[in-house]
Each structure stands twice: as C-alpha cells, then as structure tokens.
Amino acid sequence: MGKETTRDALLEAGRRMFLERGYNHSGLEAVLQAAGVPKGSFYYYFENKEDFALQVLDRFVECFTAEIDRHLTDANLSPLERLRKLSEQACQRLESQQCRNGCLVGNLSQEMADQNEAFRVRLEEIFIGWVERFATCIRQAQAVGEISDQIDAWELANFWLNSWQGAVLRAKTMRSTAPLRTFVKVIFGFVIDSPSHQEASNGN
C-alpha cells in the first residue's frame, strides 16, 4: 500500500467510524484494524488522535463543500432553483442512508465543541464558510427578484444552516426525513418570499 493510499485508507476508516460512533467512542486500534494499517504507519501521518480527527474532518468538508459549490454555481438553474435542488438532493442522500450518521460537522459540533477548543474553532470556521456560500446564492436570488431584498442575506443564510442542522439531528432520532421535508416546505413556502408573491398577497 503506497503512502497516499495508506493515508487515504486511514482517513476513510476514520470518517466512517466517527460518523457511526463519534470521536470519543472511536479507538485508534479499531480505526487501524478497519483500514488494515499497522500502528507505526499511523504516526507517520498523524501526530495523535486529535490531529487525525481534524484531518478526517477537513477531508469530509472538502468533499461536502465541493458538492455545495457544484449546486450553488450551476448556471443552468436560477439561484433559487439551485438552493432547492441542493436541499432536495441532501434529503435524498440522507434517506438513502436511513437517516443514520447525519453530518460529521454537526455530529462533532455536538460532541466536541465544549470539550476541545481546536475542534470548536475549526467547526465554526467550517460553518462560516458554508454560510458565506449560501449568502452569496441568496444575494443572487435577490438580484433577480426570486427572494425579497427585505431580509438580510447573511441572516437568512445563518437561519438556513442552523435550521437544516437541527432538522438533520431530528431526522436521526426519528429515522425519518420528515423533519427535513418540513424544513424544505417551510423555507421555500413561507420564509423565502419573492417580491412578486408579496405584491400579489398585499393586493388581496
């Protein structure tokens, strides 16, 4: 197994294990066994478990952020359609997993933010990066009249992400995408209101 292949195997085993068991209940021996890698190789790539977990987190975020960017910069769709498609496909992905595991960023936020400052800081950086991406798309939707400019794009993006993470947590406990479907219904049916729809409502 080559150097990069060994590191990739460890990171993937760590991702699966942290999603299934969390950080505190994932021992390094179990990770090594799952990856089929000897203990000495682990310390060639990672200083300790914390360093390993942060690199697992970064790998997960790199992949997930690329998916967000792919959806939110799709020139074939309007900005609002991009947001809706991203939400719908996230629902489908979680449904295909029987709503188990959830989001690694959300899971580690619940588990580690109060325990480890390095995790807390990195997790908040990740959330801010995602909020910025959503805010950019929301501003684009406002520019073409799909979302009212009466609401601050940054605030709406924060509300969006906070509500979605809460819905994912609830979906895990219910083993159902119902909370996610409710989020999509409410965010697109009531929270986001285009200027044209507002004018029609005010005229009635």
Image: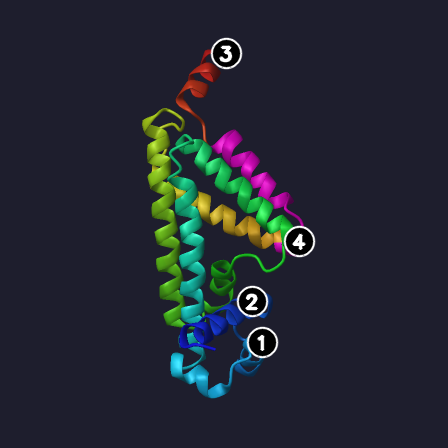
Q: Amino acid at mark 2?
A: Arg
Question: Element at badge 3?
Answer: loop
Q: Residue at x 39, y 79 (%)?
A: 45
Mark 1–mark 3 contact, CB under 8 Å?
A: no
Return the disc, 1 or 4, that comes first in the chain's sequence: 1
State how far apart marks 2 and 1 are (Cα).
10 Å
Mark 2–mark 1 contact, CB under 8 Å?
A: yes
Horizontal side of residue 37 vs 43, given as left or right: right
Closer to viewer: mark 2 or mark 1: 1
Mark 2–mark 4 contact, CB under 8 Å?
A: no
Q: Decide whether residue 182 is among the magenta residues.
A: yes
Q: Amino acid at mark 1?
A: Ala
Q: Disc 3 designates what residue?
A: 204
Closer to viewer: mark 3 or mark 2: 2
Closer to viewer: mark 1 or mark 3: 1
Horizontal side of residue 169 vs 60, given as left or right: right
State how far apart marks 2 and 4 are (Cα).
15 Å
Q: Amino acid at mark 3?
A: Asn
Return the disc, 2 or 4, that comes first in the chain's sequence: 2
